[in-house]
Amino acid sequence: MKTISAKAGNVLIGGGNPLVVQTMCNTHTSDVDATVAQCLRLHQAGARMVRITVPGPADVEHVKAIKEKLREAGADFPIVADIHFSSATAKLVAPYVEKVRINPGNFHRDHQEAMRQFASLVGECREYGTAIRIGINHGSLGDYITGLYGNTPQAMALAAMEWLRKCIELDFFNVVVSLKSSNTIVMVQAYRELVKLMEEAGYMFPLHLGVTEAGNGDSGRIKSCVGISSLLSEGIGDTLRVSLTEDPEEELPVARYLAARYDRRIVSSVTSIHLSGRKAVACYDSPSRETLLMDASCDFGKRLLDREIDDLELDGTYRDDSGRAVSVKESGFGAYLVDELMQASRRRFYKPEYVACPGCGRTMYDLQAAFEEVKARTSHLKGKVIAVMGCIVNGPGEMADADWGYVGEGGHKVTIYKKKTPVLRHVPDTEAVDRLLELIEEDDAQGS
Ligand code: SF4
């Protein structure tokens, strides 16, 4: 077995190196000063590499300016260019960044042409020492792959293997792979499948882990911990991003926690676990609410996901902000956390399932505020999957299995989707949630 490590500037990924925490800017790349400032803040907060979106060739100049200013500020951490669709943009920016993130399946509808463009990009990256992340997302597999293998975790793994085989054929190994989904079961199965396929092929490429479009708040953190920790606990994963629909700085405490826990630098605050049939009863002595939330998610996420247990009860204490011990059970936090964990591991749904992207430089509206409004006004719609996406270019393709989508167009307009079909376009954002609720009601009345 050849275990591969990728090199993005001064950061090594995989091959037994420590887990690499990363995140992504949500500034507009054309706003060079804001992007530089955010990159520096994110690095300061623990990101060892930072991704920025590169929507088109015109942004390559902005990337060059950002890199220049970062160098002047003495910053040498790797910058990753996030590319959608355009291999030409990827080739143009490759000399100026340490890594490019692409989904080569989206380079072209014709698979052979996409392969040719990928090989050409590999040539450019080889010349400049730039790493590549092959980023396959559940929501955007492309017709070629879904036509061959369906829209499944196996299809994601097989899609990634096609590109990895091309890398092997081209003798290019500066490569990381990701297989993200907002569905924790799909995400975990896809990575496990890919590991199996890579073992069979004799090459173990480094893996970038993430639960995409995880949403925000407790739910986003719990979903991310459940998916990512399930794999890290099996020794799968080399770098990770926790994607939250919040300011990217907020992702880093969770990402740092996961890296520290699975690099074996911290242990859970659980003090005892008893099994009663297929129910686990766990007692905690946690230093904070957030620690309890992350500890319990990592202690039990995989067991729930893999159906090793069917239920959970949490007891013990955590410390509030003033240092006072709070009873997990009597405060109601334990029962709430169990509900959230059940939903994150897709065992029991107690509220709607939200899919929301973190937003990035392509976002042209106040995504965080819109998501909060949609959540507040749809909280009664248990069983529905509702997506809130930051841009009209990639959002619809990335919504995966959402029943309804709220996609910001920019200019205070929204498009509402039913599954993958746009049903109302250019709705003023002041009315969009009302229209969404009306459409859902009409649809439910028709029994579809
Ligand atoms: Fe950025 Fe969201 Fe659009 Fe993805 S869907 S490109 S994260 S705004």
Image (tube, grey):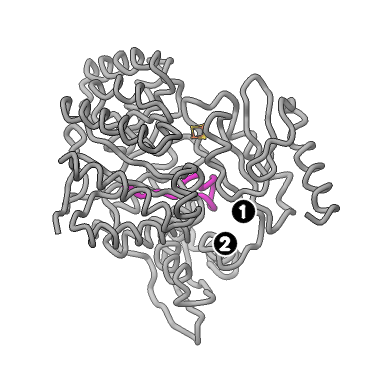
Q: Residue 30 in the image: state x and y as whole percent.
A: 42, 15
> Is residue 323 something that shows in the picture?
no
Residue receiving disc 2: 343
Residue 93 falls within the magenta-colored stretch: no
Q: Is residue 385 above or below residue 412?
A: below
Mark 1 and mark 2 residues within 8 Å of each other at the beta carbon: yes
Question: Where's the C terminus, which quadrant?
Answer: bottom right
Q: Residue at x 45, y 65 (%)?
A: 301
Relative depth, front residue between 105 and 281: 105
* Quarter assignment of residue 95: top left
- Of the numbered discs in the image, which one, if any, rests on residue 286? none
Residue type at numbered disc 1: Glu
Residue at 56% of width from left, 68% of height from top? 347
> The magenta stretch spans which residues?
208-220
Position of 48 with respect to 315 (left or right) is left
**What x and y, as percent, mark residue 350?**
65, 62
Say few, some or many: other residues with alpha carbon within 10 Å of mark 2 (under 14 / 14 to 19 / 20 or more). many
Q: What residue do we see at 62% from left, 26% from top?
A: 409
In the picture, measured across the screen, residue 161 lies left or right of residue 272, that is left
Q: Which residue is mark 1?
A: 353
